[in-house]
Image (tube, rainbow, N blue to C red):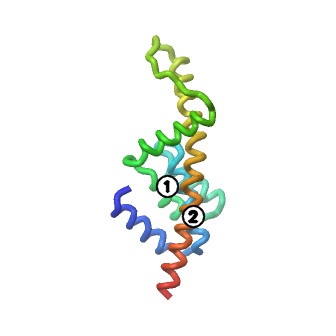
Amino acid sequence: MRLKSLRKQLKGLLSLNDTPERVAKSAALGIFISITPAFGAHTFMALGIAALFRINKTAAVLGSFFNNHLMAIPIYYICYKIGIFITGKDINFAIKPLSFSRYLHLGLDVLIPLWIGSMIVGTAISLPMFFIIKYILKKYRAKKT
């Protein structure tokens, strides 16, 4: 994430008219969602889940921008490796004769460990980010008053 983008997101979170707990919870949800391999659907997922749980939609969407195209490759690689460790499924990417079922199966062999790993990495990142965001918001608002 570029520094300007991070500053812009932080300013957006600081300016929200909601409690620090709700903003931090919403942003952490968005961060968690951004780690999932739901390519292209992070913003929609953040909006939908925030609406479902009645939390701050803006903070959730801002959090969903955490994982961007620069961070995606290393994050998804780590998620995939963790998923492989947990599932015990390592795949061989050897090219075999074309078969739709072969490539569908190969896709699931990649996606299942990736999703499992992303749940773990997403939790490991979003939980501390909840406390960090909440702390920053409380300090900022206390200083402002």
What residue do we see at 46% from left, 55% from top?
A: 66
Lateral position of residue 71 relative to residue 90, left or right: left
Lateral position of residue 95 relative to residue 88, left or right: left
How many neighbours does mark 1 have within 10 angstroms: few (below 14), some (14-19), or many (20 or more)? many
Name the residue type under label 2: Phe
Q: CA distance from mark 1 to mark 2?
A: 13 Å
- In the displayed structure, 129 sits above or below 34; it is below
First in sequence: mark 1 or mark 2?
Answer: 1
- Helix, strand or loop at label 1? It is helix
- Helix, strand or loop at label 2? It is helix
Horizontal and vertical percent position of residue 67:
45, 51
- In the displayed structure, 84 sits above or below 30; it is above
- In the displayed structure, 41 sits above or below 59; it is above
- Residue 42: which numbered mark, if any? none
Which label lies toward us, 1 or 2? 2
Horizontal and vertical percent position of residue 65:
45, 55
Name the residue type under label 1: Ser
Closer-to-camera residue (111/81):
81
- In the displayed structure, 97 sits above or below 18; it is above
Q: Which residue is mark 2?
A: 130
What residue do we see at 46% from left, 22% from top?
A: 93
Q: Give the total of numbered labels.
A: 2
Residue at the far bottom in the pictured view:
145
What residue do we see at 66% from left, 59% from top?
A: 53
Q: Which residue is mark 1?
A: 64
How many neighbours does mark 2 have within 10 angstroms: few (below 14), some (14-19), or many (20 or more)? many
Closer-to-camera residue (77/69):
77
